[in-house]
Image: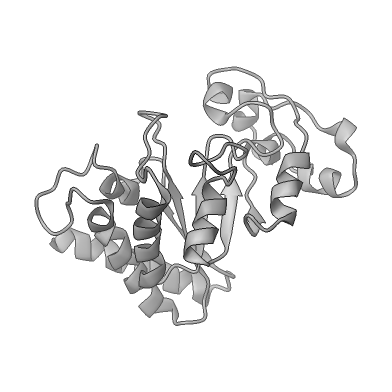
Amino acid sequence: LMSIRITSKCRADAAASAKALGFDAIELHGAHGYLIDQFFWDGTNVREDAYGSKELPGRARFAADILRAVRKAVGPDYPVIIRVSQWKQQDFTVKLAHDPKALEAWLGALVEAGADVIHCSQRRFWEPEFEGSDLNFAGWAKKITGVPTITVGSVGLSGDFIAGYAGEKSEPASLDRLEEMLDRGDFDMVAVGRALLQDPEWVVKIREGRHAELSAFDRTAMATLY
């Protein structure tokens, strides 16, 4: 428990430093197998103390404690984001929350603890999160929490990043579906990863309609820093 309290303090101190340095917001990484996510997932969190539980909101206590510490450190008006994911690299089929009710209990605890924005990571942003609705992960998160959300997952590319890291090229893809979802208010922001790693002028080219100049993503782009 002492190490958990130290972890919360370290993140709070880092957030306060980021604010003091002039950053506009901070984001906690609670996805993709990182430490916070290891507490969320019952596949890795087998604790029998207050930070372990058979229920997802109970396993979210670690993240909630960190969020409360961060919020105290940065004050009430400084934007705090947390990134979360349902799936895991170890198992693409994992869903921490199997239905909207479970998702609400999980993410609601994070918002209550101080999260202003939920960054919702998917392998493919266009895939519905639950049966019976075409809302994606970010769409559902916004609907049930009421806070702004960020979508991400193969934006602007034909294939997901796991295949890309394995050597498969991802071709430039249409953004029509993304724009449709954004226009109807499913989510508020869009995060872009590999497309920007491949081409640091990607956003400029999209804004100016220079789609013919976009290139496929190749994992060799990971070896070059612009």
Q: Going 48% across and 41% down the picture, which residue do you hit?
A: 130
The quadrant of the image that shows the N terminus is bottom left
Q: Is residue 40 above or below residue 194?
A: below
Q: Is residue 180 above or below residue 74?
A: above
Q: Going 51% across and 50% down the picture, which residue do you hit?
A: 120
Left or right side of 118 for 217: right
Q: Is residue 113 visible?
A: yes
196 or 42, which lies in front?
A: 42
Q: Is residue 110 above or below residue 179?
A: below
**Which percent across, then down, holds residue 173?**
75, 31
**Which percent across, then down, holds residue 110?**
38, 64
Residue sitting at the far bottom? 76
Residue sitting at the far top? 167
Say which quarter of the image contains residue 223. top right
Q: Going 62% across and 38% down the picture, which residue do you hit?
A: 126
Q: Going 62% across and 49% down the picture, which residue do you hit?
A: 191
**Which percent across, then down, holds residue 27?**
48, 60
